Amino acid sequence: MNSDPFILLIKTLGNLYLFVVLLRMVLQLTRADFYNPISQGVVKATSPLILPLRKIVPSIGRLDTASLVLALLVQLVTLILIVTIKGVSIAPLSYAIYTLGGTLYHLLDLYFWAMLISVILSWVAPGASHPGAMLVGQITAPLYQTCQRFIPPLGGLDLSPIFIFLAITFLKQFLAPFVV
């Protein structure tokens, strides 16, 4: 097991910021409430790096490509720092594969946790009006709608979260070897 505290610190800080950047991308992709206080915090935390990127990288439809590029850059910088501290060398193509795989893995992780929070909220506080609950609902709604086209709710029982969790877990296991 790796016990280097600097690597732990770099992974933690890199993954936290990557999570915030990916959250901004997902919030814009799902057209979540921009005036939600949590959305405002995410925008304030990411704007110093995304606004200059937007001048170079235009959006494609609803996809904020500047956020995607920033997420890839955050993952790449984290990877470079970890590889440098460990003192190993990897091929340039490996950097691209690990960067893309790690970013996708963390995006799936974001959706996993959003789904888990959504399921728990549906049990303890259905229809909650808390800003966090509303945001989670807006993020997960497209997943539910897509899955419910194939698996409609059975009476009052919605099985779509089970299949979404299975799909996310399968994809995460496929991508796990590419996460540093």
Image (spheres, rainbow, N blue to C red):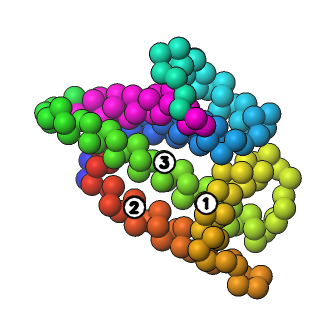
Q: Is residue 155 above or below residue 128?
A: below
Q: Is residue 99 above or below residue 44?
A: below
Helix, strand or loop status at disc 1: helix
Q: Position of residue 8 (x, y in %)?
A: 37, 40
Number of labels in the image equals 3
Helix, strand or loop status at disc 2: helix
Q: Which mark is residue 107?
A: 3
- Which circle, 1 or 3, is nearer the viewer? 1
What's the magenta region?
61-83
Residue annotated with mark 1: 143
Q: In this orientation, does residue 43 appear?
A: yes
Dividing the picture into quadrants, the one containing residue 174 is bottom left
How far apart are labels 1 and 3 at the CA level?
13 Å
Residue drawn at x 20%, y 39% is 94
Dividing the picture into quadrants, the one containing residue 97 is top left
Q: Which mark is residue 95?
A: none
